[in-house]
Image: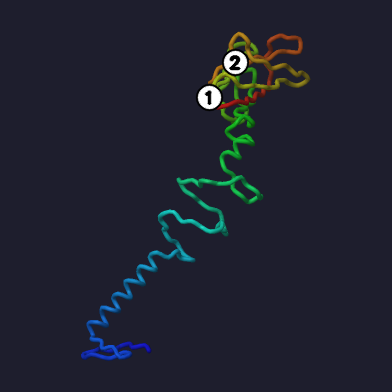
């Protein structure tokens, strides 16, 4: 039975129990407080909501769109099994990422003056020291001098040879390389390309 719009001035009886107006108001207030508590603890199925604390799911949640974690990060992720799974750091590192497998720096430059062609990657500058000799400075240094560089050089009708300067060992933050003609003479080439691989 619903009772609406009524003002009680005397006691009334429900199922043999006598109630007064004040009792009724207290009951309504308690019911409202209980409802508010339930609503505040519930996770809504629509709209925006701030959810605090740790929530444990009995099965993996399914999201209809991508997840933006903001400045936070996902933790305890397993190794991905399908194309849509997220990858944990250990899995990414095993494939390369911040590990040994990826090229950590590359650049193409004009051997006549050291001008970088395009933008390159992780290279701050190329300086022509002298004929066929250049210093490449890495934006993010390698962990030490135990890394590998490789490159090519050439111009129209002529391919050269790239090597690093044995008299100037590799440094964590830079490398000195030299370019040679096929006959072994130091030569400036129009295009020199370099890449480097190692721990950072």
* Residue position for label 1: 141
* Residue position for label 2: 176
Nearest-to-viewer mark from 2 and 1? 1
* Cα separation between marks 2 and 1: 14 Å
Secondary element at image label 2: strand
Picture residue at 60% right of the left edge, 29% below the top: 104
Q: Residues within 10 Å of mark 1 (few under 14, many from 20)?
A: some
Q: Position of residue 196 (x, y in %)?
A: 62, 25
The quadrant of the picture occupied by the N terminus is bottom left
Q: Position of residue 191 (x, y in %)?
A: 68, 22
Is 198 located above or below residue 71 in the figure? Answer: above
* Number of marks present in the image shown: 2
Picture residue at 76% right of the left edge, 9% below the top: 183
Picture residue at 36% right of the left edge, 88% below the top: 2
In the image, taking residue 93 as reference, residue 186 lies left or right, namely right
Q: Earlier in the sequence, mark 2 or mark 1?
A: 1
Q: Position of residue 100 (x, y in %)?
A: 62, 29
Q: Nearer the viewer, residue 111 or 193?
A: 193
């Amino acid at each position: 039975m619903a009772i609406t719009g009524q003002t009680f001035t005397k006691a009334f009886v429900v199922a043999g129990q006598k109630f007064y107006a004040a009792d009724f108001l207290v009951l309504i207030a308690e019911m409202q407080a209980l409802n508010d508590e339930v609503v505040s603890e519930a996770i809504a199925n629509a709209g925006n909501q701030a959810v605090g604390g740790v929530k444990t799911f009995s099965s993996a949640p399914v999201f209809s769109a991508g997840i933006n974690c903001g400045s936070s990060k996902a933790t305890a992720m397993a190794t991905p099994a399908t194309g849509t799974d997220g990858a944990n750091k250990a899995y990414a590192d095993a494939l390369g990422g911040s590990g040994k497998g990826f090229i950590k720096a590359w650049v193409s430059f004009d051997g006549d003056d050291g001008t970088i062609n395009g933008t390159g990657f992780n290279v701050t500058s190329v300086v022509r020291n002298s004929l066929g000799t250049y210093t490449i400075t890495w934006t993010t240094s390698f962990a030490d001098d135990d890394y590998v560089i490789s490159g090519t050089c050439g111009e129209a009708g002529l391919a050269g040879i790239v090597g690093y300067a044995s008299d100037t060992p590799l440094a964590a933050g830079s490398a000195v390389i030299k370019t040679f003609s096929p006959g072994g003479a130091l030569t400036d080439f129009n295009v020199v390309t370099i890449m480097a691989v190692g721990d950072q």
